[in-house]
Amino acid sequence: MAILLIEDEEGIRTFVRRGLEAAGYQVLVASDGIDGLTMAVSDDVDLVVLDLGLPGLPGEEVLTRLRQRRPGVPVIVLTAKDAVADRVANLEAGADDYVVKPFSFSELLARVRARLRHTGQLRSDTIAVGGLVLDLAARTVSVDGKVTDLSAREFELLETFARNAGNVLSQVQLLDRVWGYDFDGSSNVVEVYVGHLRRKIGSARIQTVRGAGYRLVEP
Ligand code: CA
């Protein structure tokens, strides 16, 4: 599955690209509206994430022209404007969904998945690590065959661990991927959620690596 990200702010571009790649998507990037439109029309992309405030060609114009040439490709708009009128205008111009900045990566990822599922292109994906199986479409997890309830955030955290099974993820990386780039809390939220996961999936599955972070292992 290939996703085209059209965004001029380098920080957001890098953050979203990394997250989508970690979630298993192929990511193409464009930093202005003209390149973005060219790529959206000519390249084999399954979904477009489109910032509205773009140099070259405004996002609204990219959307209108893209709709004329490729009406079927799903588009998720990133917008800093939270006004209802803007949202309605975007949807009328052909956006399938929108995410208001600042957003957390998990929020964007949920929208991306929902869109791809909606267009019938998402395969029923699973990730297995030892006796732990995550069903990414159903958002359920089973441990040695027994289904365990996780909150949405716990699932995102476990999925991030599972996609990097065996590798150490630092607290900063986990905050970045699961809670969003603008998370500025100095709380122990990662530690707390790792604690939740350990209780639910077995404490031996998530190792603490002193001074470095955590990693998911096969017990
Ligand atoms: Ca922008």
Image (cartoon, rainbow, N blue to C red):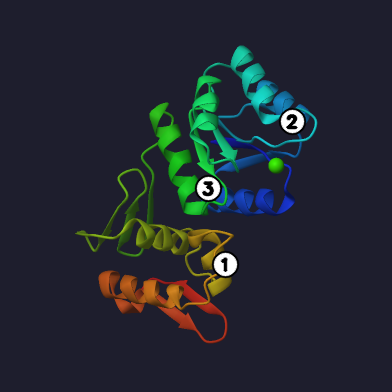
Q: Label 1: which residue? A: 173
From this view, report whether residue 170 is shown above or below residue 102: below
* Residue neighbourhood size for the residue with mark 1, other residues' Cα within 10 Å, grouped as few (<14), some (14–19), many (≥20): some
In the image: residue 29, left or right of residue 47: right
Rendered location of residue 129, percent (x, y): 38, 62
Asked if labels 3 and 1 touch by Cβ distance under 8 angstroms, the answer is no
User: Which amino acid, by three-letter code, is at mark 1?
Assistant: Gln
From mark 1 to mark 2, how far is it between C-alphas?
A: 30 Å
- Kindly identify the residue that appears in the image at 48 percent across and 58 percent down: 163
- Kindly identify the residue that appears in the image at 52 percent across and 66 percent down: 175
Say which label, 1 or 2, has the lower sequence index.
2
Helix, strand or loop at label 1? It is: helix
Residue 144 position by quadrant: bottom left
Q: Label 2: which residue? A: 33
* Residue neighbourhood size for the residue with mark 2, other residues' Cα within 10 Å, grouped as few (<14), some (14–19), many (≥20): many
Helix, strand or loop at label 3? It is: loop
Residue that protrudes farthest toward the left in the picture = 146
In the image: residue 116, left or right of residue 172: left
Per the rendering, the mark at residue 24 is: 3
* Residue neighbourhood size for the residue with mark 3, other residues' Cα within 10 Å, grouped as few (<14), some (14–19), many (≥20): few
* Residue 49 appears in the rendering: yes
- Kindly identify the residue that appears in the image at 28 percent across and 69 percent down: 201
Label 1 or label 2, whichever lies nearer to me, is: 2
